[in-house]
Image (tube, rainbow, N blue to C red):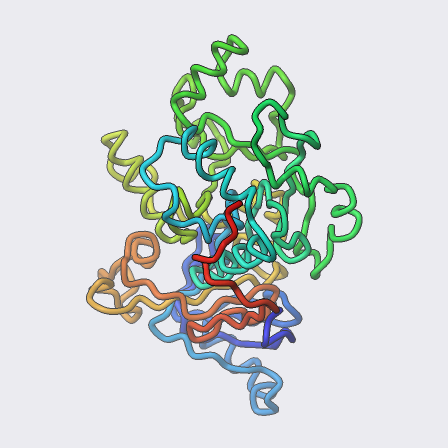
């Protein structure tokens, strides 16, 4: 739980606010008021500060100075495996199918005590400290702490194929309906069990295309469409080998971002994902600016919210939405020539979205979820309730 558990009334002032609203509005010298866990209003500092002078003097509203800082919506990770953080570095340089079958599944099957929960908590803290405030967990594994962590739950048959003679920790944790009854909608409606109609890995590796064509005589997405797996509440992860290839953004597909897990990606940092999504696609297409930095920021915010069916609640900084807010500070020479005082067309300053997506000097200073500080001044305000065992003492039996 958070140390700073009560939502406070806070007025952030003198910030550069990237709202990610429909008008793509960026407010210079902006102010944002948080009340009762919601965004009460967004505007210019010179307009909002005098309105709340009485409340400020009565210490009913805390004023938070954000000069030369950027405020953005909380980032949304639409595909993450929380229980894999303690497996970082244990399955390097393997192709996908060997990586899964020979390393990751056997390792996860041997989690003991509270390994899964410790791993999930480590991941949550990492995501918070890099600006993620909402995530979709597709298949949280045994002992990971369903109550505390996930939006999704794996649906599978109870027993893995006995002929494989391989343990699968997921066989011990299949009570998804019980979990839905107990936890769905709890934590101020932050925990959603089976919020999505479907989330699945799709067209993740080149070999997937061969498997689908040999077994089903169609492409991965043809298979999904013909079996009625596609729809507004379907989230398809990876999709790096579609057949045929297509420009999904141009075709109107809602593209969002995810980090996957630590043993393949080695991080849960969506700022890095935004940068990679921009430069990799521009390089492959040999078309600079496709996608643009702003589009990529939308992938990580409002598009992620839309993918989860939560676009009316989160994903942008607008009046009435949940106060999922990230304050970032461009620091050092890596952010030069950033200067908030030069953010006008006449001054010719660097675009703040460019700094967010491509600046290596970005530091997440504070993170609010439902108006509660879960990170403040770079420190995570989280109590896990358990102590992690030394990762070298994991019981691999």
User: Could you tell me if residue 382 is visible in this image?
Assistant: yes
**Where residue 347 sits: x, y (%)?**
23, 64
Front residue of this view, candidates 195 and 174: 174
The image quadrant that residue 110 belongs to is top right
**Where residue 346 sits: x, y (%)?**
24, 62
Give the vertical position of 69 relative to 23 (above or below). below
Give the vertical position of 211 relative to 205 (above or below). above
User: Could you tell me if residue 303 is visible in this image?
Assistant: no
Instruction: State the residue at coordinates (43%, 67%).
Output: 327
Task: Give the residue at the far bottom of this rendering.
Answer: 57
**Where residue 183 sits: x, y (%)?**
74, 53
The image quadrant that residue 239 belongs to is top left
Please state if 128 lies on the left or on the right of 224 as rendered: left
Please state if 214 lies on the left or on the right of 190 as rendered: left
Instruction: State the residue at coordinates (44%, 63%).
Output: 129
**Where residue 17 sits: x, y (%)?**
43, 63
Instruction: State the residue at coordinates (43%, 15%).
Output: 210
């Amino acid at each position: 739980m958070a140390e700073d558990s009560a939502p406070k009334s806070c007025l952030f002032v003198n910030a550069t606010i990237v709202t990610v609203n429909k008008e793509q509005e960026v407010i210079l010298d902006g102010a944002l008021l948080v009340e009762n866990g919601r965004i009460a209003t967004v505007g210019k500092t010179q307009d909002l500060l005098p309105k709340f002078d009485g409340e400020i003097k009565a210490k009913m509203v805390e004023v938070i100075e954000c000069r030369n800082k950027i405020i953005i919506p909380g980032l949304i990770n639409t595909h993450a495996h929380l229980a894999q953080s303690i497996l970082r570095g244990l399955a390097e340089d393997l192709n996908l199918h060997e990586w899964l079958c020979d390393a990751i599944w056997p390792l996860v099957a041997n989690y003991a005590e509270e390994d899964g929960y410790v791993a999930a908590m480590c991941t949550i803290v990492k995501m918070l400290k890099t600006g993620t405030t909402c995530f979709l967990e597709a298949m949280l594994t045994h002992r990971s702490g369903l109550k505390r962590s996930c939006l999704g739950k794996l649906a599978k048959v109870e027993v893995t194929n006995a002929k494989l003679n391989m343990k699968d920790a997921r066989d011990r944790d299949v009570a998804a309906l019980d979990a839905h009854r107990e936890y769905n909608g709890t934590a101020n409606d932050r925990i959603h069990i089976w919020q999505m109609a479907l989330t699945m890995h799709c067209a993740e590796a080149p070999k997937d295309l061969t498997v689908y064509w040999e077994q089903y005589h169609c492409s991965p997405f043809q298979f999904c469409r013909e079996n009625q797996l596609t729809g507004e509440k379907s989230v398809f992860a990876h999709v790096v080998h579609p057949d045929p290839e297509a420009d999904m953004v141009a075709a109107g597909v809602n593209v969002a971002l995810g980090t996957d897990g630590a043993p393949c990606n080695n991080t849960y940092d969506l700022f890095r994902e935004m940068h990679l999504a921009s430069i990799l696609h521009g390089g492959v297409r040999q078309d600079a600016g496709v996608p643009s930095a702003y589009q990529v920021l939308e992938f990580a915010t409002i598009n992620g919210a839309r993918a989860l069916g939560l676009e009316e609640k989160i994903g942008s900084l607008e009046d009435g939405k949940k106060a999922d807010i990230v304050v970032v500070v461009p620091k050092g020479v890596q952010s030069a020539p950033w200067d908030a005082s030069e953010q006008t067309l006449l001054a010719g300053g660097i675009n703040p979205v460019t700094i967010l997506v491509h600046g290596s000097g970005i530091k997440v200073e504070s993170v609010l979820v439902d108006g509660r500080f879960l990170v403040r001044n770079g420190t995570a305000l989280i109590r896990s309730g358990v102590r992690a065992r030394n990762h070298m003492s994991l019981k691999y039996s």
